[in-house]
Amino acid sequence: AMVVGIVIGSGVFFKADDVLAASGGSLPTALLAWLIGGAIMVVTAYVFSKIATRIKKVNGVVDYFEAAYGQTAGYLVAWFMTFIYYPTLVAVLAWVSANYTVGLLGLGQGVWAIAAVYLVGFFLLNCISPVLAGRWQVSATIIKLVPLGLVALVGTITGLFSGQTMQSFTASAQNVSEGGGLAVATLSTAFAYEGWIIATAINAELRDARRTLPRALVVGTIAIVIIYMLYYLGIAGALSNEQVIAAGDEAPVRVFALIFGRLGGTLLTVFVIISCLGTLNGLIMGSARGMYAIASRGLGPKSDFFNRIDPRTNSTINSAVLGFVLSSLWMVVWYGNFNGWWGGFMDISELPIAFLYVIYIAIYAWVMREYTDLGPAPRFVAPGLAAAGSLYIIWGAVQKDMFASFLALSVIIIGAGVLTMRKKARVAATTP
């Protein structure tokens, strides 16, 4: 339940048309992309479950990378997560939530203002009352499954009776100027499949974690793939491929409006917004603690400052303020995409995830080298397949517009992390 609740959020709603467009308007190709992306998630989760049962700490991939390649490597991964991964996805999720809110309220504009309100509001929630933020996360998790299940069930049944499902399978959309191919479409699914790695942080609290965690990760991720595929079939049963692409992020709402009328579409939009805000809150929980995770190890700039916990609220308030500033800056980058500032589209909803898969490959190599007590399948076959999947995701990212620009920006940001660590090491060496 935890794995499913973490992963399912906004991506499956606002990436449906992107995957179809990247697939050249072909539903079979789009479904194959969802299947490949899901298979990569399942095998990757299996490999990490083997690692998590041996390294029982609370920072997930940062702890694993530190165990594999040392403190400096772990520090740089934490720096990447804090300055790039979390704040980019927070910015995108605030925008997605605002998009659906504007549609619900019937406003013609105001997306960015509402996105800013969501950003400020949920950071304040995590600063003022982390407990309340956690309760919101649990409630949103339950609600997330409602729109997916309804679209999957109602859309599929309707499509089978009307013949729309068969038409969607046989007739590709004609309103697609250019696709991008299967690799780019698979990369688009990566956003919807992201988040399962957070579940590895609870391994120290599980009874019989060596058996329970692998089962939870594998069964949970397989369930997510099945849910997503059925949801996608539900959309295809109610809308043609052209209509899905034209509807964009509003495709699931259009499905319900067609079947249940305007009220049905409105209710579904409310569920989708709650789902998106649940994911936004979860990412902000990570972003608010990003610099704290670095500072608690005695690393990074001003570690004494960012290591503080507010005694009244038990929140990492100084770290949260930095997370808010970084998320706001990345929201400006996202805003610039829609206003032609960069001369292209820097897709920060997908590229940071692809960079995370680069980190994964290094961990797979470590598992193959060090986990000598495992059998051939978990030691070599599973990490090998996961590495191949990571390379496929990365290949899709390389083909994205402005990939080189995002790479250069990321190198600069991580380089700043290297400089701050070296400066701190020099200060420590000269301090009596």
Image: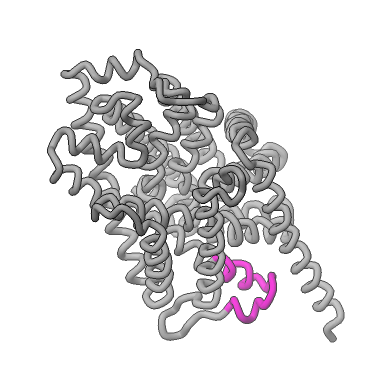
* 302 within the magenta span: yes
Specify the quadrant that holds the C terminus.
Answer: bottom right
Front residue (pair 240, 85) = 240
Q: Is residue 90 visible?
A: yes
Name the quadrant containing residue 238.
Answer: top left
Name the quadrant containing residue 11.
Answer: top left
Q: Give the percent coordinates (x, y) of residue 404.
A: 69, 42
Q: Residue at x 32, y 36 (%)?
A: 247
Q: Residue at x 51, y 72 (%)?
A: 320
Left or right of 135, for residue 400: right
The segment highlighted magenta reads: 290-307
Residue positioned most to the right: 430
Front residue (pair 315, 323) = 323
Name the quadrant containing residue 171.
Answer: top left
* 186 within the magenta span: no
Q: Give the percent coordinates (x, y) of residue 204.
A: 49, 58
Above or below, 428 relative to 214: below
Left or right of 188, for residue 405: right
Q: Is residue 51 visible?
A: no
